[in-house]
Image (tube, rainbow, N blue to C red):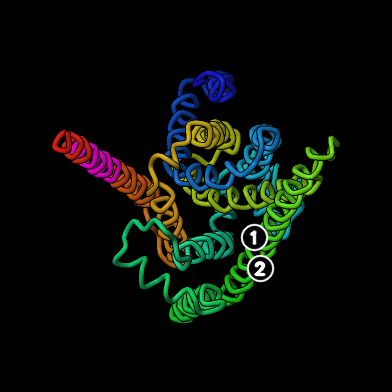
Amino acid sequence: MLLKTFGWSFAVTALGLVAAVLYGGWTGFGVVAILSVLEISVSFDNAVVNAGILKKMNAFWQKIFLTIGVLIAVFGMRLVFPVVIVAISASIGPIEAVRLALNDKDQYQQLVTDAHPSIAAFGGMFLLMIFLDFIFEDRDIKWLSWIERPLAKLGKVDMLSVCIALIALMITAMTFATQAHQHGGAHVDKAETVLISGIAGLITYLVVGGLSGYFENKLEEEEEREHEEEEKAKRAGKKVPAVVMAGKAAFFMFLYLEVLDASFSFDGVIGAFAITNDIVLMALGLGIGAMYVRSLTVYLVRQGTLDDYVYLEHGAHYAIGALAVILLVTIQYEIHEVITGSVGVLLIAWSFFSSVLRNKRMAAAEGQGSSGDKAEVSSGV
């Protein structure tokens, strides 16, 4: 089971490390290894959240997620995305951006750094909306009930999450503009860019999330109708064709997963520049890490880990909220990558141990209940 799920990740790791040695010697090997660990650590919460969505898909779409989805994640976000960002922000052609990435690494890194405010605003708003919609939903299982219970009541107000996200974006953009004015106004125009990028992130979330939710609801309706028709067909001795809506629903859920993964990738891609500005080593290291995140997502689904450890999903969403705030803060202030990576890991670890304690309490309660039942039976005899 473990080899089947992580087999491709092991193979990509071997090939990636060999390529790193051939390209950059043992120094390149070390850089790629560090980047791989960095990507896994900062994206573990991504795997937990993805697993909650992926478990709704069938085996076919899980395979699509591990094949085509990996190509998008590895080549799209870890290789093409930094080049595209540089091309757009510096108003140069993609070929020139590639030339800079390969031949003038210092200038390339500077251009990516200049583009960070718009990247952080887009990703921060997308992730913030995920967190807010989760925390404002009334759930049967609550982890930090002292905060989740009152927030669930507030969540009954329509569009509250959108309002809070827009307020956060306005504060971020205004703070950025104020700081720019105090330092000579060199980046005043970027405050407008931050605002536009943040709104684009919000619109992307609403469109993709809305479409996936719509088709998921349609799928449930079609499944109910199909079940009723199957019951009638069984009585009549007929067969009913399969419902085609499953493909559309799964496609938009897959699209949602890819946008979600892209937003999670922002911190990994930006953080990688603290280690190297070589785009080849960066793509190899982050690509290996992305493969493990993908495999871990499928592993969590197939093992039913989210069902056994019920607070994991809560911890992952709190980590999303923390990452969203960190991204918005880094528009103006620098935050060390260690903090970015450790916050998510600590929150998920906390939620995991909370789940373990909950399971032990429930097992103990069931044991006491069984003992009580046996005692009653014995006394009755």
Q: Residue at (36%, 73%) from the top-left corner? A: 150
Q: Quadrant of the C terminus?
A: top left
Q: Is residue 214 or residue 269 the one in the foreground?
A: 214
Provide residue 218's location: percent of width, then percent of height: 73, 57
Q: Tell me if residue 363 is in the magenta stretch.
A: yes
Q: Residue at (34%, 56%) from the top-left corner? A: 143
Horizontal arrangement in the rendering, residue 48 relative to residue 18 (left or right): left
Q: Is residue 17 or residue 104 the one in the foreground?
A: 17
Provide residue 92's location: percent of width, then percent of height: 74, 56
Q: Tell me if residue 362 is in the magenta stretch.
A: yes
* 49 relative to 380, above or below: below
Q: Residue at (53%, 56%) from the top-left corner? A: 113
- Give the CA distance from mark 2 to mark 1: 10 Å
Q: Which residues are magenta?
A: 357-371
Graded by Cα atoms within 10 Å as few (under 14), some (14 to 19) or many (20 or more), the crowding at tag 1 reads some
Name the chief secondary structure element in magenta. helix
Graded by Cα atoms within 10 Å as few (under 14), some (14 to 19) or many (20 or more), the crowding at tag 2 reads some
Label whose residue precedes the other's in the sequence (2 or 1): 2
Residue 209: mark in rendering: 1
Q: Nearer the viewer, mark 2 or mark 1?
A: 1
Q: Residue at (55%, 78%) from the top-left corner? A: 158
Residue 380 visible in the displayed image: yes
Q: Which three-letter amino acid code belongs to the residue tagged 1?
A: Gly
Residue 173 visible in the displayed image: no
